[in-house]
Image (spheres, rainbow, N blue to C red):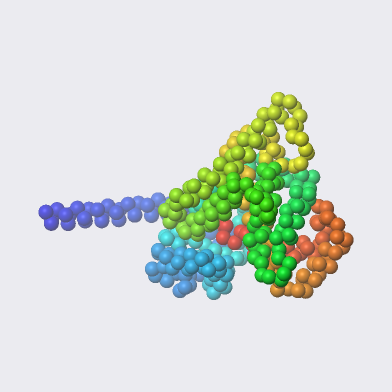
């Protein structure tokens, strides 16, 4: 019996080695050959290995970097950790996270090649699609190729200046933001207020109905559930995105419930949009009582696919809410440390004479534009969303 077991184990071991050898030969002749051709075409140099990132066994398994990233995220030092790692190991570095190869770069020419010069040769990482797909669906920020182009063609007409240039939609929410800031000199978390304000502005712009997170009166329970579920599920998506191959194990029951809550909330508005489209097709005139621009209704004029409408709304919501709130928080974080910039900015804003600004007036504030552009250079939302090569 012992002899039989030994033979069986040896056959299993030999079979495993044979399968690995076959896989390596297949990879060498397909993906490996395509990568070697690209290396030759562009004259790519090998990435420099460093003891910090590429010592055994971390160069095979990759638990070290994963632990560092998880700890940094919990301490709210994720960007600082990434930046320090690149400073120590060069502008372009290579490491593994749970057997997955990761290449990070801050080299300008590399980024220009990926996002501009050879944009069509790159795609979004599979783990990004798998991490945020359950929440956002297949929208413009989570697709590639023809599907991305279709989303772009669908959404682009909705961003004409005449449509997004109406400042009235933001006026009342900015007033609520200012009202929520204490007047007694006490410390206030502006970032939290910015995320509440952009939740309100984004929902009103996209759905035609604000969540009113900043209002002091009675709030709609459905709006509160949506805001909480969206925040919670987006944080979970971020953890999944950073976790490499373990993302498949991280979908908790709470995450599933939160996603269902978000989708149910948005689907209610999608149905309103589809009803609007149905009436518009029958009566050949706009059934709405006012001419206020609502992104949902404009989108419903171009497609009647409820899942696509929901996905595109949630993708644009991500930009309108999270990206804008991050921008505002970063700018005020920097202004608090640069009184000279704050003074120049106030001087330029005073040229408006205390009047409510129009869209073109804001575009003409050149120093404001420079402040915002400098923030983008320092704190980009695209820090860890680098694409994969199509090979």
Camera-nearest residue between 130 and 334: 334
Q: Quadrant of residue 271?
A: top right
Q: Position of residue 102 (x, y in %)?
A: 49, 61
Name of the residue lying farthest toward the left: 1
- At horizontal 55% and vertical 50% (from top left) the residue drawn is 229
Q: Position of residue 337 (x, y in %)?
A: 70, 73
Residue 253 seen in the figure: yes
Q: Which quadrant does the N terminus fall into?
A: bottom left
Q: Position of residue 386 (x, y in %)?
A: 57, 58
> How many numbered marks are there?
0
Q: Position of residue 390 (x, y in %)?
A: 53, 51
Q: Say if 63 sits above or below 11 in the image.
A: below
Left or right placement of residue 187 versus residue 83 in this view:
right
Name of the residue lying farthest toward the top: 282
Camera-nearest residue between 90 and 140: 140
Q: Quadrant of residue 325?
A: bottom right
Residue 146 seen in the figure: no
- At horizontal 46% and vertical 64% (from top left) the residue drawn is 66
Name of the residue lying farthest toward the front: 218
Q: Quadrant of residue 146?
A: top right
- At horizontal 65% and vertical 50% (from top left) the residue drawn is 218
Camera-nearest residue between 224 and 97: 224
- At horizontal 74% and vertical 31% (from top left) the residue drawn is 287
């Amino acid at each position: 019996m012992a002899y039989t077991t030994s033979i069986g184990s040896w056959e299993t071991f030999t079979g495993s080695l044979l399968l690995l050898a076959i896989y390596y030969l297949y990879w060498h002749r397909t993906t490996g050959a395509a990568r070697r051709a690209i290396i030759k075409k562009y004259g790519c140099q090998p990435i420099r290995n460093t003891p910090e990132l590429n010592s055994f066994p971390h160069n095979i398994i990759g638990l070290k970097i994963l632990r560092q990233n998880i700890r940094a995220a919990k301490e709210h030092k994720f960007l600082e950790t990434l930046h320090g790692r690149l400073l120590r190991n060069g502008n372009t570095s290579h490491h593994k996270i749970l057997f997955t190869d990761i290449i990070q770069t801050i080299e300008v020419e590399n980024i220009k090649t990926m996002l501009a010069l050879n944009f069509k040769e790159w795609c979004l990482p599979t783990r990004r699609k798998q991490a945020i797909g359950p929440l956002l669906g297949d929208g413009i920020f989570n697709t590639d190729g023809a599907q991305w182009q279709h989303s772009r063609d669908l959404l682009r007409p909705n961003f004409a200046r005449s449509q997004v240039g109406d400042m009235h939609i933001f006026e009342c929410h900015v007033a609520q933001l200012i009202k929520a800031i204490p007047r007694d000199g006490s410390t206030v978390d502006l970032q939290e207020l910015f995320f509440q304000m952009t939740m309100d502005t984004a929902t009103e712009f996209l759905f035609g109905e604000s969540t009113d997170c900043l209002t002091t009166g009675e709030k709609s329970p459905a709006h509160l559930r949506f805001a909480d579920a969206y925040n919670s599920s987006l944080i979970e998506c971020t953890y999944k995105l950073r976790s490499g191959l373990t993302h498949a194990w991280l979908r908790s029951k709470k995450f599933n419930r939160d996603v269902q809550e978000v989708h149910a909330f948005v689907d209610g508005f999608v149905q309103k949009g589809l009803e609007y489209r149905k009436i518009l097709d029958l009566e050949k005139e706009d059934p709405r009582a006012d001419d206020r621009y609502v992104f949902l209704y404009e989108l419903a004029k171009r497609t009647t696919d409820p899942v696509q409408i929901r996905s595109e709304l949630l993708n644009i919501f991500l930009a309108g809410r999270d990206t804008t709130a991050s921008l505002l928080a970063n700018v005020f974080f920097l202004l608090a440390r640069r009184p000279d910039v704050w003074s120049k900015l106030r001087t330029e804003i005073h040229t408006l004479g205390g009047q409510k600004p129009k869209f073109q007036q804001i575009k003409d504030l050149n120093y404001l534009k420079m402040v915002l552009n400098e923030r983008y250079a320092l704190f980009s939302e695209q820090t860890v969303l680098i694409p994969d090569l199509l090979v």
